Amino acid sequence: MARTSRREFVGSGLALSAGLASALANDSSSRIRLAVTTDEIDDDLGIALDFLGRHGLDHCEIRHLWGKYNTSLPIEKIRHAKALLTDAGIRLAILDTGFFKVPLPDSKSADGAKALKKQWDLLDRAFERAELLDTRLIRTFAFTYPRGGQPDPAAYPGVFELVAESAERAQRAGFRLAVENVAGSYVETAANAAEMLAQVRSPALGLTWDPNNSARAGDDEPFPAGYESLDSSRIWHVHVRDYRRTAEGEFEWCGVGDGEFDHVGQLRALLKDGYDGVVSLETHYTIEGSKAAASEHSLKGLQAAVRRV
């Protein structure tokens, strides 16, 4: 029997390791980090973290905890949440806030000044909670226009000015803000998001890209056209779900893979453009009243899309 020399053995081992590393580098599942917004599973963080662990995820997104927005909870509850995260071995990808998800205040009125102060106070609470929960990334918005109406073009300079100020405050505090595009906001579509990023050049201001929200707001092609209009280097977080239009033309949320959105194409484009953030499932529907069942169904659909990337 031929004997293998130590040099040959080590060499073959190095070749195997290099081959394995190459395979892992080409494995999309090793390059796409998935998360789920915890209250889309259960308002009880412990239950949500158990779900994430069972499905092999090590990142999450936090919005509501135990029935309240995290920014409305006392600090003791936030410390408890951090302990649960640590025990579960799960990291917080981004802290969600409702910052600037309010009507644009009239800066010249006393009521407007009061409303704006409430928002700055909210941002300060978000900084404090993000610090405790060990993330530097915070989800925010860019004000809302009246329900049933249309955004006022004349309002955009004021919107961008305040978004820029929020970014300056975040930069001084050592955080980054990722504005989410959402229907009913002055930044609701890819086109709005592209304009915001062009107008607000702060290194502390980026985007939470939600292509399904862009579709909900009337964007006929959130991907690829909408996505391609964006500065991909400033996409710092991504939300996914799925949608479909009924026979009556109504828009409804559904499980990932059950609707119209091209998740495989979007994920491929993100990887091609060097995206290294987290892709977070924000389920937005239930199965027979169960958020967890819907999140599990959508997560399986998302994981199937990842395997096809």
Image (tube, rainbow, N blue to C red):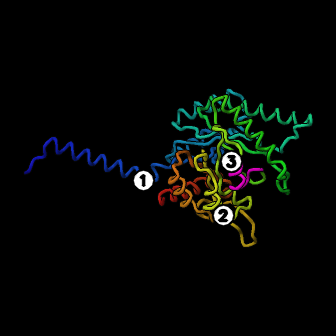
Up/down of 26 relative to 92, above or below: below
Q: Earlier in the sequence, mark 3 or mark 2?
A: 3
How many marks on residues?
A: 3
Q: Position of residue 219 (x, y in %)?
A: 71, 61
Residue annotated with mark 3: 198
Residue drawn at point x = 80 percent, y = 48 percent: 156
Label ID, residue 221: 2
Q: Position of residue 265 (x, y in %)?
A: 54, 61
Residue segment shown in magenta: 186-197
Amino acid under disc 3: Ala
Amino acid under disc 1: Asp
Q: Earlier in the sequence, mark 3 or mark 1?
A: 1
User: Is residue 114 rendered to the left or right of residue 58?
Assistant: right
Amino acid under disc 2: Glu
Residue 63 visible here: no
Q: Nearer the viewer, residue 66 or 205?
A: 205
Residue drawn at point x = 77 percent, y = 50 percent: 186
Residue annotated with mark 1: 27
